[in-house]
Amino acid sequence: MGNGIALPRRAGHAGTMLSGLLLCGLFAFGCAQQKPQSGLTQYRFEVQGESYRLRSLHLEDHSASYNELVGTNVVAVDFDQDRVIDRIMLGEMSLSRAQEVYAYGLDMLARENRLAVRTPNIQRYLHESNDHQIEIRSFRPANVPPFNEFIIANNRPIVCPEVIIIMDQNADGTLEEVLQGEISLAEAQVRYTAVLRAGLQKGQLIEANGTILVKEK
């Protein structure tokens, strides 16, 4: 992915994805505070001479909580602060490229112990399949059309299980881009369609107005 940037792998990312932990960037204050303060914090870094900022917004009343990757001509958002870029809000950068840069910045923060872990409120459907745990996460952000993330993780007890993330940008049942991992869109689509069908049959997914989303609880 990307243009040959040597970016470090994210240790322990699979566990973070599947346990639903939320990474809230207390970039300005570190982890010394027991309770994050409302407001905006940010961290500056460079990748191949390009300057970027990670901005984290957290309000104690939970009315807003998200991270942004901001570059010269790009703004990308991680709506639930789970280390995954969900949407490019400005610019032409691909999701996969933005994910590489975002992961690099988060890794730098993690090495400096400047990330706090929080429990998010995520609408998700879990589906067990042989040696894999499969998950659909639905997002309904304000002023942005709903979308889904399709996540496939290896359940076998290995040190660094592969986590595959594919985006359904319109929540219409069609996958558009592999954000992380190695899988063809065709193979991912077959699995996604089967999981959507199972979730609908169980009543854990709902279909309305051309979208298929995890049922809100």
Image (cartoon, rainbow, N blue to C red):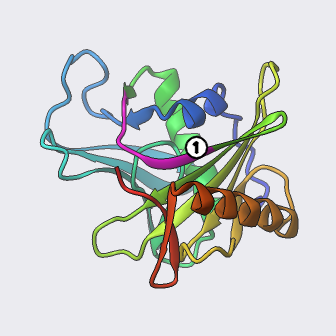
Residue 48 visible in image: no
Tell me if residue 169 comes above or below residue 135 in the rendering. Answer: below
Read off the magenta span: 118-126
What residue lies at 66% left-to-right and 26% top-to-bottom? 11
Q: Quadrant of residue 99?
A: bottom right
Q: Residue furthest bottom?
A: 209
In the rendered structure, the answer to whether residue 118 lies left or right of residue 1 reads: left
Local packing at callout 1 (Cα closer than 10 Å; few below 14, some 14-19, many 20+) is some
What residue lies at 31% left-to-right and 19% top-to-bottom? 31
Residue 114 visible in image: yes
**Residue 12 at what x, y percent from top left?**
64, 25
Q: In which quadrant is the N terminus drawn?
A: bottom right
**Residue 89 at what x, y percent from top left?**
42, 73
Residue 125 colored in magenta in the image: yes
In the rendered structure, the answer to whether residue 164 lies left or right of residue 73 reads: right
What residue lies at 65% left-to-right and 63% top-to-bottom? 196
In the rendered structure, the answer to whether residue 28 lies left or right of residue 46 reads: left
Which three-letter amino acid code belongs to the residue tagged 1?
Ala
Tell me if residue 147 comes above or below residue 138 in the rendering. Answer: below
Q: Circle 1 sits in a helix, a strand or a loop, which is it? A: helix
Q: Quadrant of residue 193?
A: bottom right
Q: Which is more toward the observer, 75 or 173?
A: 173
Residue 110 colored in magenta in the image: no
**Residue 185 at what x, y percent from top left?**
81, 68
Residue under pointer 1: 103
Q: Quadrant of residue 37?
A: top left
Q: Which is more toward the observer, 155 or 45?
A: 155
Q: How many marks?
A: 1
Q: Which is more toward the observer, 122 or 70?
A: 122
Q: Which is more toward the observer, 160 or 9?
A: 160
**Residue 179 at what x, y percent from top left?**
68, 58
